[in-house]
Image (cartoon, rainbow, N blue to C red):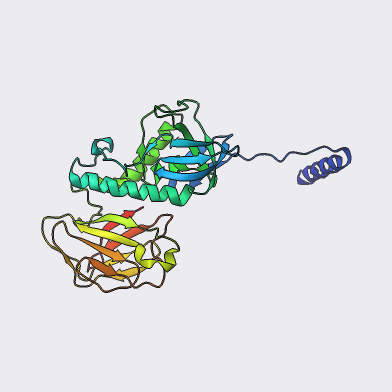
Amino acid sequence: MRVLAALVVALAVALAGCGGITIAEPTPQRVQSTADEPSAGPLPDPATEASVVAVVDGDTIRVAYPNGSEDTIRLLGVDTPEVHAENDPAEFEGVPDTEAGRECLRAAGGDASNFAKDGLLGETVGVVGDPNADRRDRYDRRLAYVVVDDRLFNYRLVATGHARVYESDFSRLDRFHEAERTAREARRGLWTCLDSSAATRTPGDSPLAVAEIHADAAGNDNENLNDEYVVFENRGDSPLSLAGWTVGDAAGHTYAVGDVTLDPGERVTLYTGSGTDTADSLYWDADGAIWNNGGDTVVVRDADGRVVLERSY
């Protein structure tokens, strides 16, 4: 049977060469999936090609089309926390309606914007609508899916916890809800804001929280190490000693915290580069960038090696 198939292919090629016939390659069905994300299903096709010229925030971008025209795209089916306005915790089920909850969402909004910049800014993407959705919103922004590297970026925002599902009429709503459920259960991204104090923590139940992650330093990260940093905050009601604790990333880099104690509400910033430690500034003294611009995980362990805080972005 294989010999016969080979003969048929050879004959087709020969005929194409002699008679000017073009044999079209079969188009494979493109399905986006990764090991750590549920599938969004087949990618929409066809899509209009465009270049991303600006990222307004996690769910809104500006694109330029080949004909020179530009448009604002509101990513369909998703809603990331606000960066330029106040957040309403009620829009994110389970996030407490407190100042801590709003602050946690604001930090998550910054993470989502950085995630969008890393994944989209300067890239050539596919822009395509959904048959069940409106073409534009009330602000005249185009409602669309954005496809980059054969993956649906709207869906990635939800699956990684950078966005909630925006309740509206679109054909992939069920798949998006499943991705959101998985992200919530794993406490990814904005869903680290779920508990009563909005602290980002794991079963260690520590009041230590990540207040800000600045992974993308200006210019070359490796040449501007002190513009890469993580800000920690004590959101508890009593002083918190960090002596003997460690901070690490997904790649296994580890920083050992010295004799540091945070009073309630106090913050300390851990810079990747070198400097002199103070009450509110610590320096990793690393030779190169630590935090991956495309996404990473901040892991904090106490003096006994137990994970007390884990924050993905």
Picture quadrant of residue 301: bottom left
- Comparing 123 with 42, the one in front is 123
Q: Furthest residue to the front?
A: 68
Name the one closer to the observer, 134 or 195.
134
State how many labels appear: 0
Residue at 24%, 47% (x, y): give it.
Answer: 103
Is residue 41 among what the camera can see? yes
- Which residue is pictured at 41% across the width and 36% down the height? 176
Q: Position of residue 24 (x, y in %)?
A: 74, 38
Visible residue check, residue 35: no
Give the percent coordinates (x, y) of residue 167.
Answer: 36, 30
x, y percent for residue 6: 79, 45
Quadrant (top left/top right/bottom left/bottom right) for the N terminus: top right
Residue 225 placement, left or right of 18: left
Residue 156 x/y as whole percent: 44, 44
**Looking at the image, which residue is at 48% across and 47% down?**
120
Horizontal arrangement in the rendering, residue 244 relative to residue 84 (left or right): left
Q: Please, which residue is most extreme toward the left here?
A: 238
* Left or right: residue 182 compared with residue 12: left
75 or 257, which lies in front? 75
Q: Residue at x 20, y 70 (%)?
A: 243
Q: Does 28 sit above or below residue 111?
A: above
Outermost residue toward the right?
Answer: 18
